Amino acid sequence: MPENLRSQVVTQGVQRSPNRAMLRAVGFGDEDFTKPIVGIANGYSTITPCNMGLNELAKRAEAGAKVAGAMPQMFGTITISDGISMGTEGMKYSLVSREVIADSIETVCNGQSMDGVLAVGGCDKNMPGAMIAIARMNIPAIFVYGGTIKPGNHNGRDLTVVSAFEAVGQHSAGKIDTNELLQVERKACPGAGSCGGMYTANTMSSAFEAMGMSLPYSSTMAAEDAEKAESAEKSAFVLVEAIQKQLLPRQIVTRKAFENAISVIMAVGGSTNAVLHLLAIAHSIGVELCLDDFETIRARVPVLCDLKPSGKYVATDLHKAGGIPQVMKMLLVRDLLHGDALTITGQTIAEVLADVPEQPRADQDVIRPWNNPMYAQGHLAILRGNLATEGAVAKITGVKTPSITGPARVFESEEASLAAILAGKINRGDVLVIRYEGPKGGPGMREMLAPTSALIGAGLGDAVGLITDGRFSGGTYGMVVGHVAPEAAVGGAIALVEEGDTITIDARDRLLHLHVPDEELERRRAAWQPPKPRYTTGVLAKYAKLVSSSSVGAVTDLDLG
């Protein structure tokens, strides 16, 4: 079998002379037309610290691919900075960018008949976007994470960008002065890399390592450390070997791989966004996966790592303590991972982890011993009830009481809720309802880091509930429930809540309930009118037209057949 299985359609034969002529202009020589063409999907940009170091990694991968006997071709793809767009209209483009990234990588790789792809990404949507494309195309592929940012430091305290969001709430509550807020702002993000806690970027990089689509240890490396570039170069060699063997994503990204990823996400205390993204990737590759699978795995996997946002440490600390392989080995020896699942290296998970100790080192406390976990069960709970008949996702780590019943405080947008919090109008025991922020209604399912951080900063994190059909940042913690489905824009029950209605959030019983009689809900539903679309042209309008429910991953190609 030729290594240029796909690209030979543009490089071989007399009739492809014009094609070769153009390829010669970008660096191909006579000897290169029989080599496999490897796409380097480069998410580099100076938009965000998450991605500003990616170009060097892409260049190292490019050099590695050449040495390994392939012909690399680099192309760009976009990014949106969640942290910079957070709390603004621009955040509506964040989840949309996942689809744009997936579409762009698929378009280039299939349009140019590439034999494989190495995707380099940093910010939150780069990873699921790349993996959705990889799943669709099913060509040899590997993902290279851009790496995590090193923590900032102020007065002996490690900082991340979430520290700045929480400082806003502290400042509004009069707990810190303007100078202290400025010092946190100046020191929170000291250089290149994705947000430092177990937020969405580090969660998804960990998931992809667990799935076997990235190299061992690569998901927690610091962006600015030499080992990150070395790992990128090594990834190119591994990819070329996968092309030679025709080791395809559908052999790796199986049902077992998804279960492994979910187990690791629970063990490290990862982001709620992982639920949305894994559902979307599973759809793209044709693996059956649903919300209930997360609940099944949550019940048997403890939270082992003491990581921000609700814990103490950041991803670089996890790396020093043994990284994702150490967590995986602890799960494997207790039959909570599928050791026979294949990885992009050609080895199984069990073979990759063979030399990893079964117990974490005693000189660290980032990874807890099995008999002393942070929490006995996973932290991502799937809630259902008359407010979420399709399901909702709650992140319950860092919450002192797992249930709350209180009066609804209803807001039609994130901005309206944040204004009320900062003005001191939210009381202990309230349940905030932020609606029309779902996939269709937003559109784009904005993350609610600004209001949740403001609640934490104001000292209300354990005393106030919040539900939304939008999303939460990986930096969020507290009694918060997102991904409420059906969403308000399609007439879900969240659209029918009125100010002062009583709502129960119960993580223990996995319940999200509106205490309003069925007949009254039916009366309200009959009177409800769908809102006019907020956008009628452009990418947001197209997205709102195509996007599915969050309960199936908010994908844009669900019923196109």
Image (spheres, rainbow, N blue to C red):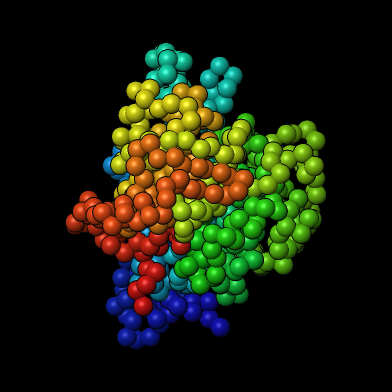
Q: Position of residue 533 (x, y in %)?
A: 22, 54
Q: 189 and 414: which one is in front?
A: 414
Closest to the observer, 175 or 73: 175
Which quarter of the rendering shows the C terminus?
Answer: bottom left
How many marks the image carries: the answer is 0
Q: Quadrant of residue 536?
A: bottom left
The picture places residue 497, in percent across and down from the top left corner, at 36, 45
Q: Residue at x 73, y 40 (%)?
A: 373
Q: Quadrant of residue 314?
A: top right
The quarter of the rendered structure image containing the N terminus is bottom right
Q: Position of residue 22 (x, y in %)?
A: 31, 70
**Residue at x 38% of width, y 36% of height:** 500
Of the pair 237 and 120, the residue shown nearer to us? 120
Q: Name the residue at 54% across, 70% down.
A: 287
Q: Is residue 320 above or below residue 64?
A: above
Which residue reaches farthest left? 536
Residue 320 visible? The answer is no
Is residue 507 among the parts visible in the rendering? Answer: yes
- Is 224 on the left or on the right of 434, as rendered? right
Q: Percent x, y for residue 319? A: 65, 41
